Image (cartoon, rainbow, N blue to C red):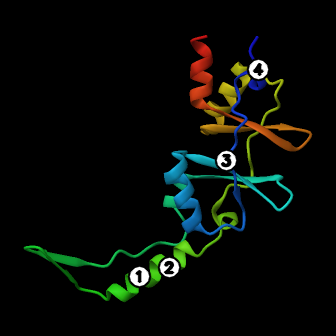
Amino acid sequence: MLTAGDIMTTQIYTVHRDSEIKALAKIFVERKVNALPVVDDDGLLVGMVTQTDLVEQDKPLHIPTVISLFDWVIYLESPKKFSEAVRKVTARKVGEICTADVVTCSPETPVSEVASLMVDNKVHLVPVLTEGQLVGVVARLDVIRSMGS
């Protein structure tokens, strides 16, 4: 029987809870990942952050009304107001938007149970912990890949 330890990815990208949203967005783009474990100063798991968390922040970003005329864009509101809203959102910290209640497993957890955790909790990435330490992650693709082996 395959376990999380058999299929997990051990090269783990993490983000610190005090990182700014702007840095998080850059990591998502550069690393081509959809979710990241959030860690504290000691490297301990304190949450998970997803692209959805980034897009659906609880502080709304007001998009100003514009008129497009030929190749011109005419703001009906101040472009400065829009820039300020973007600055406020991107200055927030990852710890403010991450999910603190994280679904985890151990390396000994059967892959079938990891798959159930993913489905039941609607998550795509499950951190793997040994004695509280992050040792890997199992993504949905890892589970799918294990079905073909």
Assess whether mark 3 and mark 4 are in contact (beta carbons under 8 angstroms).
no
The CA distance from mark 1 to mark 2 is 6 Å
Q: Quadrant of the N terminus?
A: top right
- What is the total number of numbered labels drawn onto the structure image? 4
The CA distance from mark 1 to mark 3 is 30 Å
Q: Which of disc 3 and disc 1 is earlier in sequence? A: 3
Q: Which of disc 4 and disc 1 is earlier in sequence? A: 4
Q: Which of disc 3 and disc 4 is earlier in sequence? A: 4
Assess whether mark 2 and mark 1 are in contact (beta carbons under 8 angstroms).
yes
Residue depth check, mark 4 versus mark 3: number of the one nearer the observer: 3
In the rendered image of this protein, does residue 31 appear above or below residue 20?
Answer: above
Residue depth check, mark 1 versus mark 3: number of the one nearer the observer: 3
Q: Quadrant of residue 109?
A: top right
Q: Of helix, strand and loop, which one carries label 4?
A: loop
The CA distance from mark 4 to mark 3 is 21 Å
Q: Circle 3: is it few (<14), some (14-19), or many (20+) Cα within 10 Å?
A: some
The residue tagged 1 is 83
Residue that appears at 67% across and 47% down: 13
Image location of residue 120, percent across then percent down: 65, 33
Numbered mark located on residue 13 in the image: 3
The CA distance from mark 4 to mark 2 is 44 Å
Q: Please, what is the three-letter code of the amino acid marked with disc 3?
A: Tyr
The residue tagged 2 is 87
Numbered mark located on residue 116 in the image: none
